[in-house]
Amino acid sequence: MSDEQTTFLLLAVLYLVECCLIAGRDSFLFLPRPFGHFWQAQAAGKGLAVRHGVLAVLPPLTPWRPAVLSSPAPLLFHPSGIIHRETGREIRWEEINSLSAENARLYINGAPFARFQDEYGAVEAMNRLKALISAPPETRPAAIRALLALRGQPGSVKRAVQRMKRRTFPLRLLGTVQLPVMFAMPPVLFHLLPPGAAFLLSAALIFLTGWCISGLFFRIHRKLYPERRGERWGKLFHFLLYPPGTIGATHALSLPLGSRYHPAAWACALLPERDRRSFLARLLREGRYPVSRGACSPDAAERFREASREEYEALHSYLDRCGLLPPEEEPEWEEKDGCTRYCPRCLGIYRTEAETCPACSVIPLQPLPARRERQGTDCGGREENSP
C-alpha cells in the first residue's frame, strides 16, 4: 500500500470514529433530510449493543447535517419510590439519604443508579428527586404528575433549532473547509512532495484548521449552553490535543439540545405530518403497554406499570393540548394469511397459540379487530406455531 493510500485510509478511520456515538436504547436521532425542509427520526436502539447502550453511526458530511439526540429519562417516578426504566431496579423514597450527579451519572447513597445522555440530564434528575423527597407523602403523587408534564411547545422547539443552526453556521462553514484539508490535501501533497515534507505540511494544515474550529466551538458553546461550563472546557481540551476530533464539533453542539425536550416535542416540531403521526402513535402505544427489560417481582412489575401509566397520561395530555394527538393505529392484514391475533404494542400480526407477543415478551395478544377496508399486508414474517 502506498503512502497516499495509507494516509487516506487512516484519515477515513478517524472520520468514522468521530461519526460514532453511544446512545441509550430508547433514544431517537433526529436528522435533517438531505434535501427538503423537514427532518427524519431514527431509532438509535437498532445499533450495535454496548455496555451503556447502543453504538449509533451518524450520517456522513457531518458539518451540514446537525443531529439531535433525544430520549426519555431513565427514571420512572412512583409514589413509593423511583424505578430504573431499563433494569427495573427500585429505591424507596425513605431509603434515599444522599444524591449527587457526576460524569452524566446519577448517584444515590454514593452508588451509581442511572446514566444520562449528558451532565445536564443528570443534574436535572437530581434536582427533581430533591423536590420530590422534600414533598410530603400525601402530596407526592400530585408533585410527580406536575414534574412529568412535558415542556416545550412545537413553536419553541423550532425556534431552538433555528437558533442552533444560526449560531453554528460559521462552524459548519469551516467544517466544510476541513473536509478537503483532511481528505484531499494529504494525498496530493504526498504525490508532489517527499514523504517527510508531505507529512509535516499535512499535519500542520490539519492542526491549524482544528485549532481554529476549537476556538469557534468554544465561543458558540458558551452562547448556546452557558450553564455547561465543565462540558465546554472538556471538549476544548480534547479538540486542542486531538484536532481531527473537531470533525464532530457540529454534533457536539447539536446533540445536547435533545436533552431539553421529550422526543415527542421534537417529533411535533420537526417531522412531516405523516411521519409525525406514526412516530407519536408508536410512543403512545409503548407508553400504554410498557415493557421492562429487567426481571422483577409481580409487585415491582405492577409499580412499573403504574409509573409508566403516569408518563403515558402526561404524553397524552401534552399532545391533546397541542392539538397533535394522532389517531389510534390498527393492525393491517390479509384474510388469506390466517392471522388471528395481534400485539397492541408493536402491532405485530400472528398465527400462534401463545398468550403473549413473542417480540414484546409480556404483552398479551389480542384478537384482531373487525375487518375494515384497508391496504393489505402480510404477517410481516412474525409467525410462531404456524399450522
Image: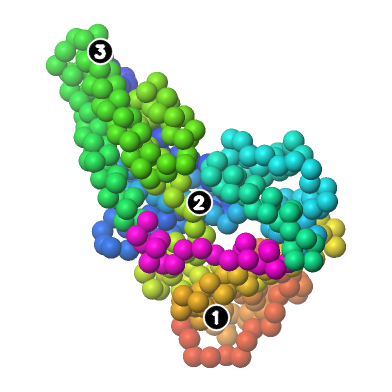
In this figure, which colouring scheme has been used for the structure?
Answer: rainbow
Task: Compute the Cα span from label 3 to label 2.
Answer: 41 Å
Quadrant in which residue 18 is drawn = top left
Tell me which label, 1 or 2, sits earlier in the chain: 2
Picture layout, residue 149 above or below residue 90: below
Residue 163, can we see it?
yes
Task: Say which quadrant the C terminus sits in.
Answer: bottom right
CA separation in Å, label 1 and label 3: 62 Å
**Magenta-colored stretch includes residue 151:** yes
- Describe the element under mark 2 as helix, strand or loop: helix
Q: Nearer the viewer, residue 284 or 350?
A: 284
On the image, the x and y values in percent for residue 154 come to 41, 67
Disc 1 crowd rating (10 Å Cα; few below 14, some 14-19, many 20+) is: few
Residue 332 position within the rendered picture, expressed as x and y whole percent measured from the top left: 54, 80
The answer to whether residue 321 is left or right of residue 214 is right
Mark 3 residue type? Leu
Q: Secondary structure at mark 1?
A: loop
Instruction: In the rendered view, tell whether residue 234 sits above or below residue 59.
Output: above
Q: Nearer the viewer, mark 1 or mark 2?
A: 2
| Closer mark to the observer between disc 3 and disc 2 | 2
Q: Residue at x 37, y 56 (%)?
A: 160
Q: Give the image quarter of residue 106.
A: top right
Q: Amino acid at mark 1?
A: Glu
Q: Earlier in the sequence, mark 1 or mark 3?
A: 3
Q: Mark 1 sits on what residue?
A: 328
Residue 177 lies, with reference to residue 7, above or below; the image says below
Magenta-drawn segment: 141-160
Query: Which is the main secondary structure of the residues drawn in magenta?
Result: helix
Q: Residue at x 53, y 91 (%)?
A: 372
Disc number for residue 259 = 2
| Residue 91 shown left or right of residue 278 in the figure | right
Check residue 200 in the rendering and tell me which mark sits there, or answer none. Answer: 3
